[in-house]
Image: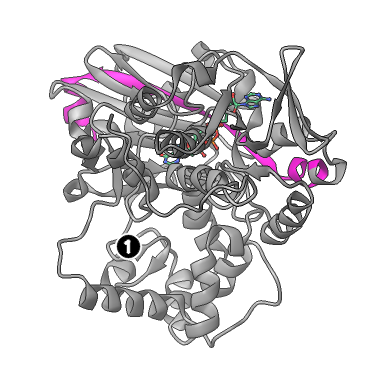
Amino acid sequence: MKRIAIVGGGIAGLSAAYRLEEKRRGGVPLDYVLFEAAPRLGGVLGTNHVNGCLVEAGPDSFLTEKPWAADLCRQVGLGDQLIGSNDADRKTYLLTGGKLTVMPDGLMFMVPTKILPTVFSPLFSVGTKLRMAREWFHPPHKANGDETVAALVTRHYGSEMVDRLADPLLSGVYGGEASQLSVRAVLPRFAEMEAKHGSLGRAMLAARRKMGQAAQAPPKPLFTSLKDGMQQLVDAVLARLTASSLRRGTYVSSVQPEHGKWIVTADQRSLEFEAVVVATPTQAAAAVLKDASAELAGELGAIQYSSSVTLTLGYDKAVRDSLPPGFGFLVPRSEGKRMLAATFVHNKFPHRAPADSALIRCFLGGARDEAILQLSDEEIVQTARRELREILGLEAVPQFSRVYKWKGAMAQYSVGHLERLERIEGLRQRLPGLALAGNGYRGIGVPDCVRSGAEAASSLWSFLGLAPDARQLPLNA
Ligand SMILES: Cc1cc2nc3c(=O)[nH]c(=O)nc-3n(C[C@H](O)[C@H](O)[C@H](O)COP(=O)(O)OP(=O)(O)OC[C@H]3O[C@@H](n4cnc5c(N)ncnc54)[C@H](O)[C@@H]3O)c2cc1C
Protein backbone atom coordinates (compact mmCIF):
# COMPACT_ATOMS: atom_id res chain seq x y z
CA MET A 1 0.00 0.00 0.00
CA LYS A 2 1.45 3.39 -1.05
CA ARG A 3 0.73 6.24 1.36
CA ILE A 4 0.62 9.83 0.13
CA ALA A 5 0.33 13.00 2.23
CA ILE A 6 -1.27 16.19 0.96
CA VAL A 7 -0.45 19.37 2.88
CA GLY A 8 -3.05 22.13 2.39
CA GLY A 9 -6.77 21.72 1.84
CA GLY A 10 -7.51 24.61 -0.52
CA ILE A 11 -8.86 23.82 -3.97
CA ALA A 12 -5.40 22.70 -5.17
CA GLY A 13 -5.04 20.17 -2.33
CA LEU A 14 -8.64 18.99 -2.76
CA SER A 15 -8.08 18.51 -6.48
CA ALA A 16 -4.98 16.38 -5.73
CA ALA A 17 -6.96 14.37 -3.18
CA TYR A 18 -9.78 13.81 -5.67
CA ARG A 19 -7.32 12.44 -8.23
CA LEU A 20 -5.86 10.06 -5.63
CA GLU A 21 -9.33 8.97 -4.53
CA GLU A 22 -10.18 8.14 -8.15
CA LYS A 23 -7.13 5.89 -8.32
CA ARG A 24 -7.89 4.29 -4.98
CA ARG A 25 -11.45 3.50 -6.00
CA GLY A 26 -10.15 2.17 -9.29
CA GLY A 27 -8.34 -0.52 -7.28
CA VAL A 28 -4.87 1.03 -7.05
CA PRO A 29 -3.36 0.12 -3.67
CA LEU A 30 -2.90 3.61 -2.27
CA ASP A 31 -4.00 5.60 0.72
CA TYR A 32 -3.79 9.33 1.33
CA VAL A 33 -4.07 11.80 4.20
CA LEU A 34 -4.92 15.46 3.63
CA PHE A 35 -3.67 17.84 6.35
CA GLU A 36 -5.35 21.23 6.65
CA ALA A 37 -4.34 23.77 9.28
CA ALA A 38 -7.73 25.51 9.37
CA PRO A 39 -10.85 23.98 10.89
CA ARG A 40 -12.53 23.96 7.48
CA LEU A 41 -11.46 22.75 4.05
CA GLY A 42 -11.62 24.80 0.84
CA GLY A 43 -8.99 27.49 1.57
CA VAL A 44 -10.16 30.81 0.17
CA LEU A 45 -13.31 29.26 -1.38
CA GLY A 46 -16.35 29.80 0.81
CA THR A 47 -19.96 30.89 0.45
CA ASN A 48 -22.44 32.27 2.97
CA HIS A 49 -26.17 32.89 2.69
CA VAL A 50 -27.37 36.14 4.22
CA ASN A 51 -30.95 37.53 3.94
CA GLY A 52 -31.62 35.41 0.86
CA CYS A 53 -28.41 36.65 -0.81
CA LEU A 54 -25.44 34.54 -1.74
CA VAL A 55 -22.22 36.03 -0.41
CA GLU A 56 -18.86 34.78 -1.66
CA ALA A 57 -15.98 35.14 0.79
CA GLY A 58 -13.24 34.57 -1.80
CA PRO A 59 -13.57 33.84 -5.54
CA ASP A 60 -17.06 34.33 -6.95
CA SER A 61 -16.49 32.60 -10.32
CA PHE A 62 -13.79 31.46 -12.70
CA LEU A 63 -12.79 32.14 -16.28
CA THR A 64 -14.81 29.93 -18.65
CA GLU A 65 -11.93 29.81 -21.10
CA LYS A 66 -9.87 27.71 -18.65
CA PRO A 67 -11.69 24.35 -18.50
CA TRP A 68 -10.24 22.59 -15.45
CA ALA A 69 -12.54 23.91 -12.71
CA ALA A 70 -15.70 23.29 -14.75
CA ASP A 71 -14.39 19.80 -15.63
CA LEU A 72 -13.92 19.02 -11.94
CA CYS A 73 -17.45 20.33 -11.24
CA ARG A 74 -18.82 17.93 -13.87
CA GLN A 75 -16.79 15.02 -12.48
CA VAL A 76 -18.23 15.56 -9.00
CA GLY A 77 -21.78 15.69 -10.31
CA LEU A 78 -22.26 19.46 -10.51
CA GLY A 79 -22.60 19.72 -14.30
CA ASP A 80 -26.20 20.93 -14.02
CA GLN A 81 -25.21 23.48 -11.38
CA LEU A 82 -22.80 25.41 -13.61
CA ILE A 83 -23.99 28.89 -14.52
CA GLY A 84 -22.56 31.63 -16.72
CA SER A 85 -22.22 35.32 -15.98
CA ASN A 86 -25.03 37.49 -17.32
CA ASP A 87 -22.94 38.81 -20.23
CA ALA A 88 -25.91 40.51 -21.89
CA ASP A 89 -25.51 43.13 -19.13
CA ARG A 90 -21.73 43.14 -19.16
CA LYS A 91 -20.49 46.64 -18.89
CA THR A 92 -17.63 47.74 -16.71
CA TYR A 93 -16.83 51.25 -15.57
CA LEU A 94 -13.58 52.88 -14.67
CA LEU A 95 -13.28 55.70 -12.17
CA THR A 96 -11.52 58.63 -13.78
CA GLY A 97 -11.41 62.09 -12.25
CA GLY A 98 -13.97 60.94 -9.67
CA LYS A 99 -16.51 59.90 -12.32
CA LEU A 100 -17.50 56.49 -13.63
CA THR A 101 -16.78 56.12 -17.33
CA VAL A 102 -17.85 53.05 -19.21
CA MET A 103 -15.03 51.03 -20.78
CA PRO A 104 -15.29 51.34 -24.55
CA ASP A 105 -16.67 48.49 -26.62
CA GLY A 106 -14.03 46.32 -28.29
CA LEU A 107 -11.49 46.56 -25.49
CA MET A 108 -9.94 43.12 -25.13
CA PHE A 109 -8.09 43.12 -21.83
CA MET A 110 -6.75 46.65 -22.36
CA VAL A 111 -6.12 46.20 -26.10
CA PRO A 112 -8.45 48.36 -28.22
CA THR A 113 -9.81 46.47 -31.25
CA LYS A 114 -12.58 48.85 -32.35
CA ILE A 115 -11.69 52.28 -33.61
CA LEU A 116 -14.82 54.39 -33.13
CA PRO A 117 -15.74 53.47 -29.54
CA THR A 118 -12.13 54.13 -28.53
CA VAL A 119 -11.88 57.44 -30.40
CA PHE A 120 -15.03 58.76 -28.73
CA SER A 121 -14.29 57.37 -25.25
CA PRO A 122 -13.55 60.07 -22.65
CA LEU A 123 -11.40 57.49 -20.88
CA PHE A 124 -8.22 58.35 -22.75
CA SER A 125 -6.44 61.61 -23.53
CA VAL A 126 -5.81 62.69 -27.12
CA GLY A 127 -2.14 61.72 -26.67
CA THR A 128 -3.07 58.13 -25.74
CA LYS A 129 -5.54 57.92 -28.63
CA LEU A 130 -2.80 58.97 -31.03
CA ARG A 131 -0.52 56.33 -29.57
CA MET A 132 -3.26 53.76 -30.07
CA ALA A 133 -3.41 54.69 -33.74
CA ARG A 134 0.38 54.47 -34.06
CA GLU A 135 0.37 51.13 -32.22
CA TRP A 136 -1.23 49.60 -35.28
CA PHE A 137 2.16 49.93 -37.01
CA HIS A 138 4.27 48.69 -34.11
CA PRO A 139 7.04 46.47 -35.55
CA PRO A 140 7.54 42.94 -34.19
CA HIS A 141 9.65 43.11 -31.06
CA LYS A 142 11.22 40.30 -29.08
CA ALA A 143 12.03 41.49 -25.57
CA ASN A 144 15.43 40.52 -24.32
CA GLY A 145 14.36 38.51 -21.27
CA ASP A 146 11.43 39.11 -18.98
CA GLU A 147 10.00 42.53 -18.20
CA THR A 148 7.14 44.08 -16.27
CA VAL A 149 3.63 44.35 -17.70
CA ALA A 150 3.98 48.12 -17.30
CA ALA A 151 7.07 48.17 -19.55
CA LEU A 152 5.30 46.33 -22.37
CA VAL A 153 2.07 48.34 -22.11
CA THR A 154 3.97 51.65 -21.98
CA ARG A 155 5.94 50.68 -25.08
CA HIS A 156 2.65 50.21 -26.99
CA TYR A 157 0.22 52.71 -25.51
CA GLY A 158 2.04 54.96 -23.04
CA SER A 159 1.86 55.33 -19.28
CA GLU A 160 -1.76 56.54 -19.13
CA MET A 161 -2.83 53.06 -20.27
CA VAL A 162 -0.87 51.52 -17.40
CA ASP A 163 -2.61 53.73 -14.84
CA ARG A 164 -6.10 53.61 -16.35
CA LEU A 165 -6.31 49.97 -17.43
CA ALA A 166 -3.34 47.67 -16.81
CA ASP A 167 -3.04 48.42 -13.09
CA PRO A 168 -6.75 48.24 -12.21
CA LEU A 169 -7.26 45.07 -14.26
CA LEU A 170 -4.26 43.35 -12.69
CA SER A 171 -5.13 44.43 -9.17
CA GLY A 172 -8.55 42.83 -9.69
CA VAL A 173 -6.92 39.49 -10.55
CA TYR A 174 -3.61 39.44 -8.64
CA GLY A 175 -3.97 42.24 -6.12
CA GLY A 176 -0.72 43.31 -7.81
CA GLU A 177 0.94 46.09 -9.76
CA ALA A 178 1.70 46.34 -13.47
CA SER A 179 5.09 47.76 -12.49
CA GLN A 180 5.98 44.55 -10.62
CA LEU A 181 4.24 41.69 -12.41
CA SER A 182 6.04 39.68 -15.08
CA VAL A 183 4.72 39.79 -18.65
CA ARG A 184 5.91 36.28 -19.33
CA ALA A 185 4.17 34.83 -16.28
CA VAL A 186 1.02 36.94 -16.26
CA LEU A 187 0.36 37.84 -19.90
CA PRO A 188 2.45 35.40 -21.94
CA ARG A 189 0.15 35.85 -24.96
CA PHE A 190 1.01 39.55 -25.09
CA ALA A 191 4.72 38.79 -25.33
CA GLU A 192 4.05 36.21 -28.07
CA MET A 193 1.75 38.55 -29.99
CA GLU A 194 4.31 41.34 -29.85
CA ALA A 195 7.08 39.07 -31.10
CA LYS A 196 4.97 37.75 -33.97
CA HIS A 197 2.75 40.66 -35.03
CA GLY A 198 4.27 43.74 -33.44
CA SER A 199 0.93 45.45 -32.89
CA LEU A 200 -1.19 43.96 -30.08
CA GLY A 201 -4.32 45.43 -31.67
CA ARG A 202 -3.67 43.70 -35.01
CA ALA A 203 -2.75 40.45 -33.21
CA MET A 204 -5.99 40.49 -31.17
CA LEU A 205 -8.08 41.07 -34.27
CA ALA A 206 -6.31 38.26 -36.13
CA ALA A 207 -6.93 35.91 -33.19
CA ARG A 208 -10.59 36.93 -33.03
CA ARG A 209 -11.08 36.38 -36.77
CA LYS A 210 -9.52 32.94 -36.46
CA MET A 211 -11.77 32.03 -33.53
CA GLY A 212 -14.81 33.40 -35.35
CA GLN A 213 -14.07 31.21 -38.37
CA ALA A 214 -13.57 28.11 -36.20
CA ALA A 215 -16.48 28.59 -33.82
CA GLN A 216 -20.02 27.99 -35.03
CA ALA A 217 -21.41 27.83 -31.51
CA PRO A 218 -22.65 30.97 -29.70
CA PRO A 219 -19.97 32.64 -27.55
CA LYS A 220 -19.55 31.27 -24.03
CA PRO A 221 -20.03 33.53 -21.00
CA LEU A 222 -16.82 35.11 -19.77
CA PHE A 223 -17.21 33.77 -16.21
CA THR A 224 -18.60 30.47 -14.91
CA SER A 225 -19.78 29.76 -11.40
CA LEU A 226 -22.08 27.48 -9.45
CA LYS A 227 -25.74 28.13 -8.70
CA ASP A 228 -25.22 27.88 -4.99
CA GLY A 229 -21.76 29.41 -4.88
CA MET A 230 -18.17 28.20 -4.91
CA GLN A 231 -18.67 26.29 -1.66
CA GLN A 232 -20.69 23.80 -3.70
CA LEU A 233 -17.50 22.66 -5.39
CA VAL A 234 -15.75 22.16 -2.07
CA ASP A 235 -18.70 20.22 -0.62
CA ALA A 236 -19.10 18.01 -3.69
CA VAL A 237 -15.39 17.10 -3.75
CA LEU A 238 -15.44 16.39 -0.01
CA ALA A 239 -18.48 14.13 -0.42
CA ARG A 240 -16.38 11.96 -2.71
CA LEU A 241 -13.27 11.77 -0.55
CA THR A 242 -12.70 9.25 2.23
CA ALA A 243 -13.71 11.03 5.45
CA SER A 244 -11.04 9.29 7.55
CA SER A 245 -8.35 10.66 5.18
CA LEU A 246 -9.13 14.29 6.08
CA ARG A 247 -7.33 15.95 9.01
CA ARG A 248 -8.80 19.40 9.62
CA GLY A 249 -7.23 21.78 12.15
CA THR A 250 -3.88 20.04 11.69
CA TYR A 251 -0.92 22.33 11.04
CA VAL A 252 2.03 20.64 9.36
CA SER A 253 5.31 21.96 10.75
CA SER A 254 7.72 19.98 8.60
CA VAL A 255 7.99 17.62 5.67
CA GLN A 256 11.32 15.87 5.14
CA PRO A 257 12.79 12.88 3.38
CA GLU A 258 14.32 10.12 5.47
CA HIS A 259 15.61 6.74 4.29
CA GLY A 260 13.53 6.79 1.11
CA LYS A 261 10.33 7.84 2.89
CA TRP A 262 8.73 11.20 3.65
CA ILE A 263 8.20 12.16 7.29
CA VAL A 264 5.33 14.59 7.86
CA THR A 265 5.26 16.21 11.28
CA ALA A 266 1.97 17.68 12.48
CA ASP A 267 0.82 18.39 16.02
CA GLN A 268 4.10 16.97 17.44
CA ARG A 269 3.46 13.63 15.71
CA SER A 270 5.47 12.24 12.81
CA LEU A 271 3.89 10.05 10.17
CA GLU A 272 5.57 8.16 7.34
CA PHE A 273 4.53 8.40 3.68
CA GLU A 274 5.92 7.28 0.32
CA ALA A 275 5.23 10.65 -1.31
CA VAL A 276 3.89 14.09 -0.51
CA VAL A 277 2.03 16.87 -2.31
CA VAL A 278 2.63 20.29 -0.75
CA ALA A 279 -0.38 22.37 -1.85
CA THR A 280 -0.03 25.48 0.30
CA PRO A 281 0.93 29.05 -0.63
CA THR A 282 4.66 29.01 -1.40
CA GLN A 283 5.55 30.95 1.76
CA ALA A 284 4.01 28.14 3.83
CA ALA A 285 5.65 25.55 1.55
CA ALA A 286 9.02 27.19 2.26
CA ALA A 287 8.45 26.85 6.00
CA VAL A 288 7.49 23.16 5.91
CA LEU A 289 10.26 22.24 3.46
CA LYS A 290 13.14 24.19 5.06
CA ASP A 291 14.73 21.06 6.54
CA ALA A 292 14.24 19.07 3.32
CA SER A 293 16.10 21.67 1.23
CA ALA A 294 17.11 25.13 2.40
CA GLU A 295 17.77 26.11 -1.22
CA LEU A 296 14.28 25.08 -2.35
CA ALA A 297 12.76 26.80 0.66
CA GLY A 298 14.68 29.98 -0.27
CA GLU A 299 13.27 29.99 -3.80
CA LEU A 300 9.73 29.25 -2.60
CA GLY A 301 9.91 31.91 0.08
CA ALA A 302 11.04 34.51 -2.45
CA ILE A 303 7.67 34.41 -4.23
CA GLN A 304 5.77 37.34 -2.79
CA TYR A 305 2.08 37.38 -1.86
CA SER A 306 -0.36 40.22 -1.40
CA SER A 307 -3.34 40.38 0.94
CA SER A 308 -6.87 41.33 0.11
CA VAL A 309 -10.21 42.07 1.68
CA THR A 310 -13.65 41.41 0.24
CA LEU A 311 -16.62 43.23 1.64
CA THR A 312 -20.18 42.51 0.58
CA LEU A 313 -22.91 45.03 1.33
CA GLY A 314 -26.61 44.18 0.97
CA TYR A 315 -29.17 46.88 0.14
CA ASP A 316 -32.84 47.22 -0.72
CA LYS A 317 -34.64 47.66 -4.03
CA ALA A 318 -34.39 51.45 -4.00
CA VAL A 319 -30.61 51.16 -4.10
CA ARG A 320 -30.79 48.48 -6.79
CA ASP A 321 -32.86 50.82 -8.96
CA SER A 322 -30.44 53.70 -8.38
CA LEU A 323 -27.25 51.86 -9.35
CA PRO A 324 -25.89 52.00 -12.88
CA PRO A 325 -26.35 48.92 -15.08
CA GLY A 326 -23.39 46.58 -15.61
CA PHE A 327 -21.02 44.36 -13.67
CA GLY A 328 -19.31 47.06 -11.61
CA PHE A 329 -16.27 49.31 -11.70
CA LEU A 330 -12.50 49.41 -11.36
CA VAL A 331 -10.57 52.10 -9.50
CA PRO A 332 -7.11 53.19 -10.69
CA ARG A 333 -4.68 53.99 -7.85
CA SER A 334 -4.33 57.54 -9.10
CA GLU A 335 -7.92 58.16 -7.90
CA GLY A 336 -6.64 57.99 -4.31
CA LYS A 337 -9.18 55.45 -3.03
CA ARG A 338 -8.65 52.30 -0.99
CA MET A 339 -11.22 50.38 -3.01
CA LEU A 340 -9.73 48.56 -6.00
CA ALA A 341 -12.97 47.38 -7.58
CA ALA A 342 -16.63 46.78 -6.88
CA THR A 343 -19.01 44.23 -8.41
CA PHE A 344 -22.76 44.70 -8.74
CA VAL A 345 -23.45 41.06 -7.94
CA HIS A 346 -27.20 41.34 -8.65
CA ASN A 347 -26.29 42.15 -12.29
CA LYS A 348 -23.35 39.79 -12.79
CA PHE A 349 -25.14 36.74 -11.32
CA PRO A 350 -28.78 37.90 -10.97
CA HIS A 351 -30.13 34.95 -8.97
CA ARG A 352 -27.56 35.63 -6.20
CA ALA A 353 -29.72 38.43 -4.83
CA PRO A 354 -33.55 38.49 -4.67
CA ALA A 355 -35.15 40.90 -7.16
CA ASP A 356 -35.82 43.40 -4.37
CA SER A 357 -32.17 43.50 -3.20
CA ALA A 358 -28.86 44.92 -4.35
CA LEU A 359 -25.56 43.27 -3.56
CA ILE A 360 -22.29 45.19 -3.90
CA ARG A 361 -19.02 43.33 -3.44
CA CYS A 362 -15.99 45.54 -2.83
CA PHE A 363 -12.40 44.46 -3.26
CA LEU A 364 -9.71 46.23 -1.20
CA GLY A 365 -6.07 45.72 -0.23
CA GLY A 366 -3.54 44.49 -2.75
CA ALA A 367 0.22 44.93 -2.89
CA ARG A 368 0.16 48.64 -2.04
CA ASP A 369 -2.29 48.45 0.84
CA GLU A 370 -1.35 45.64 3.23
CA ALA A 371 -2.31 48.06 6.02
CA ILE A 372 -5.99 47.45 5.27
CA LEU A 373 -5.68 44.23 7.30
CA GLN A 374 -5.04 46.30 10.42
CA LEU A 375 -8.48 47.93 10.21
CA SER A 376 -11.40 46.46 12.12
CA ASP A 377 -14.34 45.11 10.14
CA GLU A 378 -16.35 48.17 11.13
CA GLU A 379 -13.60 50.53 9.89
CA ILE A 380 -13.49 48.64 6.58
CA VAL A 381 -17.26 48.98 6.19
CA GLN A 382 -17.05 52.72 6.97
CA THR A 383 -14.19 53.21 4.49
CA ALA A 384 -16.08 51.42 1.72
CA ARG A 385 -19.32 53.25 2.46
CA ARG A 386 -17.53 56.61 2.34
CA GLU A 387 -15.97 55.75 -1.02
CA LEU A 388 -19.25 54.40 -2.44
CA ARG A 389 -20.87 57.69 -1.41
CA GLU A 390 -18.14 59.61 -3.25
CA ILE A 391 -18.25 57.40 -6.35
CA LEU A 392 -21.95 56.48 -6.65
CA GLY A 393 -23.63 59.03 -4.41
CA LEU A 394 -24.80 56.04 -2.36
CA GLU A 395 -26.00 57.30 1.03
CA ALA A 396 -28.22 54.38 2.05
CA VAL A 397 -27.39 52.31 5.12
CA PRO A 398 -26.71 48.69 4.12
CA GLN A 399 -29.04 46.02 5.48
CA PHE A 400 -26.05 43.80 6.15
CA SER A 401 -22.32 43.62 5.58
CA ARG A 402 -19.80 40.79 5.54
CA VAL A 403 -16.02 41.32 5.65
CA TYR A 404 -13.45 38.65 4.75
CA LYS A 405 -9.73 39.26 5.21
CA TRP A 406 -7.26 37.19 3.23
CA LYS A 407 -3.71 37.61 4.47
CA GLY A 408 -0.98 36.71 1.96
CA ALA A 409 -3.41 34.80 -0.26
CA MET A 410 -2.57 36.13 -3.73
CA ALA A 411 0.73 35.20 -5.35
CA GLN A 412 2.61 37.93 -7.18
CA TYR A 413 4.42 36.65 -10.26
CA SER A 414 7.19 39.22 -10.43
CA VAL A 415 9.78 39.62 -13.20
CA GLY A 416 11.84 36.42 -13.45
CA HIS A 417 9.04 34.22 -12.07
CA LEU A 418 9.33 31.60 -14.83
CA GLU A 419 13.10 31.34 -14.35
CA ARG A 420 12.48 30.89 -10.62
CA LEU A 421 10.00 28.09 -11.42
CA GLU A 422 12.69 26.35 -13.46
CA ARG A 423 15.09 26.53 -10.51
CA ILE A 424 12.34 25.25 -8.20
CA GLU A 425 11.63 22.37 -10.55
CA GLY A 426 15.36 21.48 -10.67
CA LEU A 427 15.55 21.46 -6.86
CA ARG A 428 12.29 19.53 -6.54
CA GLN A 429 13.66 16.80 -8.81
CA ARG A 430 16.41 16.24 -6.28
CA LEU A 431 13.68 15.28 -3.82
CA PRO A 432 11.92 12.30 -5.44
CA GLY A 433 8.38 11.80 -4.22
CA LEU A 434 7.72 15.51 -3.66
CA ALA A 435 5.13 17.38 -5.73
CA LEU A 436 4.10 21.04 -5.47
CA ALA A 437 0.72 22.59 -6.22
CA GLY A 438 -1.21 25.78 -5.60
CA ASN A 439 -1.52 29.35 -6.77
CA GLY A 440 2.15 30.27 -6.39
CA TYR A 441 3.31 28.60 -9.60
CA ARG A 442 1.55 28.69 -12.98
CA GLY A 443 -1.76 30.44 -12.52
CA ILE A 444 -3.54 32.07 -9.64
CA GLY A 445 -7.16 31.45 -10.69
CA VAL A 446 -9.31 28.57 -9.46
CA PRO A 447 -9.04 26.59 -12.75
CA ASP A 448 -5.23 26.72 -12.70
CA CYS A 449 -5.16 25.65 -9.05
CA VAL A 450 -7.44 22.69 -9.84
CA ARG A 451 -5.12 21.73 -12.70
CA SER A 452 -2.00 22.10 -10.56
CA GLY A 453 -3.40 19.79 -7.85
CA ALA A 454 -4.40 17.15 -10.37
CA GLU A 455 -1.04 17.33 -12.15
CA ALA A 456 0.86 17.13 -8.86
CA ALA A 457 -0.96 13.92 -7.94
CA SER A 458 -0.44 12.41 -11.41
CA SER A 459 3.25 13.33 -11.37
CA LEU A 460 3.71 10.84 -8.54
CA TRP A 461 2.38 7.80 -10.39
CA SER A 462 5.62 6.70 -12.04
CA PHE A 463 7.67 7.45 -8.91
CA LEU A 464 5.33 5.21 -6.96
CA GLY A 465 5.48 2.51 -9.63
CA LEU A 466 1.79 2.96 -10.44
CA ALA A 467 0.28 2.87 -13.94
CA PRO A 468 0.04 6.32 -15.56
CA ASP A 469 -3.40 7.91 -15.93
CA ALA A 470 -5.11 6.02 -18.75
CA ARG A 471 -8.51 7.53 -18.11
CA GLN A 472 -10.32 9.54 -15.50
CA LEU A 473 -12.92 7.62 -13.54
CA PRO A 474 -15.73 9.90 -12.49
CA LEU A 475 -16.50 9.32 -8.84
CA ASN A 476 -20.24 9.34 -8.86
CA ALA A 477 -20.60 6.55 -6.36
C1 LIG B 1 -10.41 37.43 -2.25
C2 LIG B 1 -10.04 36.55 -3.40
C3 LIG B 1 -10.81 36.57 -4.55
C4 LIG B 1 -10.48 35.73 -5.63
N1 LIG B 1 -11.28 35.74 -6.73
C5 LIG B 1 -11.07 34.83 -7.71
C6 LIG B 1 -12.01 34.65 -8.75
O1 LIG B 1 -13.04 35.31 -8.79
N2 LIG B 1 -11.75 33.70 -9.70
C7 LIG B 1 -10.64 32.91 -9.65
O2 LIG B 1 -10.46 32.05 -10.51
N3 LIG B 1 -9.72 33.04 -8.65
C8 LIG B 1 -9.93 33.97 -7.68
N4 LIG B 1 -9.04 34.07 -6.64
C9 LIG B 1 -7.83 33.24 -6.65
C10 LIG B 1 -8.11 31.80 -6.23
O3 LIG B 1 -9.29 31.71 -5.48
C11 LIG B 1 -6.96 31.25 -5.38
O4 LIG B 1 -5.72 31.51 -6.00
C12 LIG B 1 -7.09 29.74 -5.18
O5 LIG B 1 -8.36 29.39 -4.69
C13 LIG B 1 -5.98 29.26 -4.25
O6 LIG B 1 -6.14 27.89 -3.99
P1 LIG B 1 -4.96 27.10 -3.26
O7 LIG B 1 -5.47 25.75 -2.94
O8 LIG B 1 -3.72 27.21 -4.07
O9 LIG B 1 -4.66 27.94 -1.92
P2 LIG B 1 -5.52 28.28 -0.64
O10 LIG B 1 -6.96 28.40 -0.94
O11 LIG B 1 -4.82 29.44 -0.02
O12 LIG B 1 -5.34 26.99 0.27
C14 LIG B 1 -4.13 26.66 0.90
C15 LIG B 1 -4.47 25.94 2.19
O13 LIG B 1 -3.26 25.49 2.79
C16 LIG B 1 -3.44 25.56 4.20
N5 LIG B 1 -2.12 25.55 4.85
C17 LIG B 1 -1.15 26.49 4.76
N6 LIG B 1 -0.08 26.12 5.48
C18 LIG B 1 -0.38 24.93 6.02
C19 LIG B 1 0.34 24.02 6.88
N7 LIG B 1 1.58 24.29 7.30
N8 LIG B 1 -0.28 22.87 7.26
C20 LIG B 1 -1.54 22.57 6.83
N9 LIG B 1 -2.25 23.39 6.03
C21 LIG B 1 -1.67 24.54 5.63
C22 LIG B 1 -4.19 26.86 4.38
O14 LIG B 1 -4.85 26.89 5.65
C23 LIG B 1 -5.15 26.84 3.21
O15 LIG B 1 -6.42 26.30 3.54
C24 LIG B 1 -9.35 34.89 -5.54
C25 LIG B 1 -8.57 34.87 -4.38
C26 LIG B 1 -8.91 35.67 -3.32
C27 LIG B 1 -8.09 35.63 -2.05
Looking at the picture, does residue 304 appear above or below residue 127? above
**Residue closer to the observer: 320 or 125:** 320
Does residue 445 appear in the picture of this structure?
Answer: yes
Q: Is residue 300 magenta?
A: yes
Q: Residue at x 29, y 17 (%)?
A: 396
Furthest toward the left, the residue is 355
Residue 231 x %, y % = 36, 25
Segment tinted magenta in the rendering: 297-324
**Residue closer to the observer: 289 or 114:** 289
* Quarter of the figure with the C terminus: top left
| Residue labelled with disc 1 | 121
* Quarter of the figure with the N terminus: top right
Residue 46 x %, y % = 41, 24
Q: Residue at x 68, y 39 (%)?
A: 282
Q: Secondary structure at mark 1?
A: loop
**Residue closer to the observer: 358 or 440:** 440
Counting other residues with Cα less than 10 Å from the Cα at mark 1, is it few (<14), some (14-19), or many (20 or more)? some
Please identify the quarter of the rendering in which residue 326 is found.
top left
Please identify the quarter of the rendering in which residue 411 is found.
top right
Looking at the picture, does residue 458 appear above or below residue 316? below
Q: How is the image coloured?
A: one colour
Q: Residue at x 61, y 22 (%)?
A: 373
Q: Amino acid at mark 1?
A: Ser
Q: Residue at x 28, y 41 (%)?
A: 74
Looking at the picture, does residue 255 appear above or below residue 437? above
